[in-house]
Image (cartoon, coloured by chain):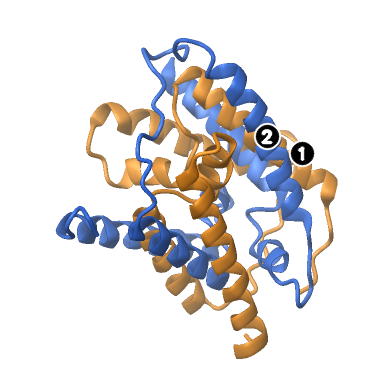
Amino acid sequence: METNFTPLMSLAGGVLIGLAAVLLMATLGRIMGATGVLTGVVMPYRPSDWSWRAAVLAGMVSAPVLAVLFTGFRPEIAVPVTPLMLVVGGLLVGVGVTFGAGCTSGHGVCGTARLSPRSLVATGVFMAATFVTVFVVRHLVGV
Amino acid sequence: MRLILGYLIGVIFGIGILVSGMANPAKVLNFFDIAGAWDPSLAFVMGGALGVTFLGYRLVLKRASPLTDVKFHLPTKTDIDARLVAGSATFGVGWGIAGFCPGGALPALGTGNPSVMIFVAALVVGIWIATWAQRRLPVAA
């Protein structure tokens, strides 16, 4: 499935993601990681950490609702994979980000911006693994 | 106050994800498909997010503390162990199969798209399984 190259929209979105990361550090002193936010909500171990994470998660989930209400913007979500691939992929992502202690936002953006050696290694490894997996799935298996 | 700030920051992050294309698996997978229908847009997402965070963190972390807490909560682990590498590799394989990463999928939940719900349900089960397994593994693994 072809997609359009959108450098300006993608750059603007990236700037907002970075802005959220900086604001969360400036106000609550926390790393803006989707894995940490979700894990803190579905695996609450300290009530004080649960509430702010639940608030961030609620903000994320309400973003598309607010976007469509105020601007009419509806993001395109095209899923070129089967439901089975979503389930298998979701399980692997869940296991991987738990053992790897982070994902694209936590390691890829926040950790890389701090030049954390763990995050630089994690980001290099998951980006490489994703490139290889997409090549295998699309060009060797042919889904 | 902390909860209002958290909510607003979540909204900013979510809008950023939706505008950037990170919530669209077709676009994400095409970024990784250099041998096929390559779409380099996501490099611009990473560039924008990293540039702002790199500069912003330098300003923010010079301060003694964040606005609403007594200290910054920065990760303290420094060891590059098998768990970090194997976990990150597993994440990458899953991302390449499904096309969603956690940060891309969570804001997309609010669209009510059924594919996103399937992915996030599996993601949560994966987190539960791994958290359970981690507690049973020796620390040095």
Q: Secondary structure at mark 1?
A: helix
Does residue A51 lie above or below B22 as drawn? above
Residue at 80% of width from left, 45% of height from top? A9
Relative height, residue A113 to residue B19 (above, below): above
Q: How many marks?
A: 2
Whether residue A74 appears in this view of the structure is no
The quarter of the rendered structure image containing the C terminus of chain B is bottom left
Residue indicated by mark 2:
A16
Q: Residue furthest bottom?
A: A141
User: Circle 1 sits on which residue?
Assistant: A12
Q: Contact, CB < 8 Å: mark 1 with mark 2? A: yes
Chain letter, disc 1 residue = A
Q: Position of residue B128 (x, y in %)?
A: 28, 57
Residue positioned 41% across, 21% down in the render: B72
User: At 52% across and 40% down in the image, what residue appears?
Assistant: A111
User: What is the drawing colour of chain A?
Assistant: orange
Residue B49 in percent (x, y) is at 67, 39
Chain ID for blue: B
Quick check: B93 above or below B79?
A: below
Tell whether B128 sits left or right of A65.
left
Mark 2 — on which chain does it sit? A
Residue B58 x %, y %: 60, 22
Relative horizontal placement of residue A69, taking residue B125 as reference (left or right): right
